[in-house]
Image (cartoon, rainbow, N blue to C red):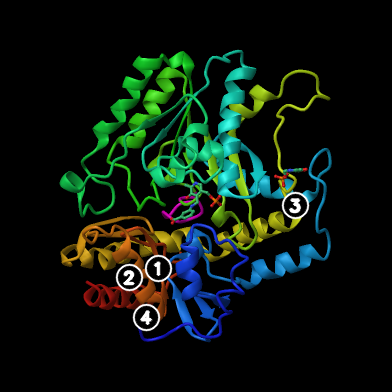
Amino acid sequence: MKNQPTHSPSPEAMDAYWMPFTANRDFKQSPRLIASAKGHHYISNDGRKIYDGFSGLWTTGIGHCHPKIVEAVQKQVGELDLCMGFQLGHNKAFELADKLTNLAPEGFDHAFFANSGSESVDTALKIALGYHRVRGDAGRTRLIGRQRGYHGVNFGGISVGGIAPNRKMFSANLINGVDHLPHTHNLEHAAFSHGQPEWGGHLVAELEHLVALHDASTIAAVIVEPVPGSTGILPPPVGYLERLREICTKHGILLIFDEVITAFGRIGAPFAAQRFGVTPDLITTAKGLTNGVIPMGAVLATDTIYQAFMQGPEQSIELFHGYTYSGHPVAAAAGLATLEVYEQEGSFQQSRELETLFAEAIHQFDDHPTVIDVRNFGLMGAIELAPRSGAPGARGLDAHKHCFWDEDLVIRNGMDILQFSPFLNSKPEDLESMFDAVRRVLDQIS
Ligand code: PXG
Ligand code: PLP
């Protein structure tokens, strides 16, 4: 490869940090280290300016170190660093909940704060279970996720999640009473679809089979990502989400949209619920809520759900759940600044306007010899490579490394699926040069 790691600590000096979702030993032999970031670029330890084609793991949609967010955080941290969040509060958490619910679909009037997508998901599952219980319907305990779904890494999230490697080490300890709908990935019928595939809407009928098997009175909620992201971008087949909503409503089952990736402009609207015109009962968010600057997640709930809990004596706690850092002042300040910038810069509209160009650019790879599928929706895209015989994931990781070392480009690979999460305010010429670089890499690696 053209460049090699320099300016990095020795493997021994890197030993203490057990890195998340990383091949630790491989990484520490040849570390890809970042010293700073600004706008659409990282600066690596060896001083190279590297284009971020993944918006900081789906988070920094309006660019790194956005000056208005940086300023808000700097001001807040010197003014109120932490405020005990239980039985005490501060203005910014209330203001953020207000702004967030104004952006959300009609009827979503309440926000519960967490610190990540994983915590948001486990919070939403608990709210769903609690909702039925407080209404005297405590038999509704069953949760339904979907194969290939990613809902973070906490026990609730991996139980409803459908990514096998994330589950198998813990398989005996996953929460009870969980079923999974089939995923909608199908190379035979839907490869190279532009946007939503025509094929696959019928797969939602499996929910009716699960209802017939268990009886609706035992099922609390269904959780899905409107556009599954982490598994490699699986846009919902035409009609799928609409039908899912209908079946849930018919049987009194709550529908949770996990919008940790899809919210805040990633698919050209504040929330995927609005883009698809399908309204769930709970929405989970994180990532773009603060443009990735400070960890924060939120669960949005409809007034119906919130009011169901607001019963009993007024001095009693309605939901025995919360995190030390729920509504943290610095995160709340970052969130408020982020939502303000989205509005001022028209970020969601910018994203919507880039969609066509992004779709055209990524579908240039439809006829590449190593490519078996290309998928896109909004500013989410995937190029699925054929796995090398006997070495699944190797071609994808090779592509990631070559992009980093030879092309000064960060992309993400989930096994052999290359994923793209361009900035909401990307420059068209940057998208074009990113895909030119990807083509050079794919032409080079076998
Ligand atoms: N739900 C969804 C839909 C997500 O995408 C989470 C929950 C968990 O969020 P936290 O903040 O706990 O990580 C996510 C996170 C990838 C990738 O490769 C995506 C995520 C995480 C790691 C890798 O696309 N999304
Ligand atoms: N473990 C211990 C011993 C704690 O005291 C707490 C919180 O007080 C937690 C875990 C949970 O931490 P958090 O509220 O940051 O999720």
Spatial CA span between label 4 and label 1: 11 Å
Spatial CA span between label 1 and label 2: 9 Å
For marks 1 and 3, give the one nearer the viewer.
1
Please report contact status of discs 1 and 2: CB closer than 8 Å, yes or no.
yes
Residue bounds of the magenta highlight: 262-270
Q: Secondary structure at mark 3?
A: helix
10 Å crowding of disc 3: few (<14), some (14-19), many (20+): many
Residue 61 percent location from the top left of the image: 50, 63
Spatial CA span between label 1 and label 3: 35 Å
Who's the residue at 35% across and 25% down the image?
207
For marks 2 and 3, give the one nearer the viewer.
2
Spatial CA span between label 4 and label 2: 10 Å
Residue 126 percent location from the top left of the image: 60, 31
Q: Secondary structure at mark 2?
A: helix
Who's the residue at 43% across and 84% down the image?
4
Q: Which residue is mark 3?
A: 92
Q: Which residue is mark 4?
A: 407
Q: Which residue is mark 1?
A: 411
Residue 110 magenta = no
Q: Which residue is mark 2?
A: 399
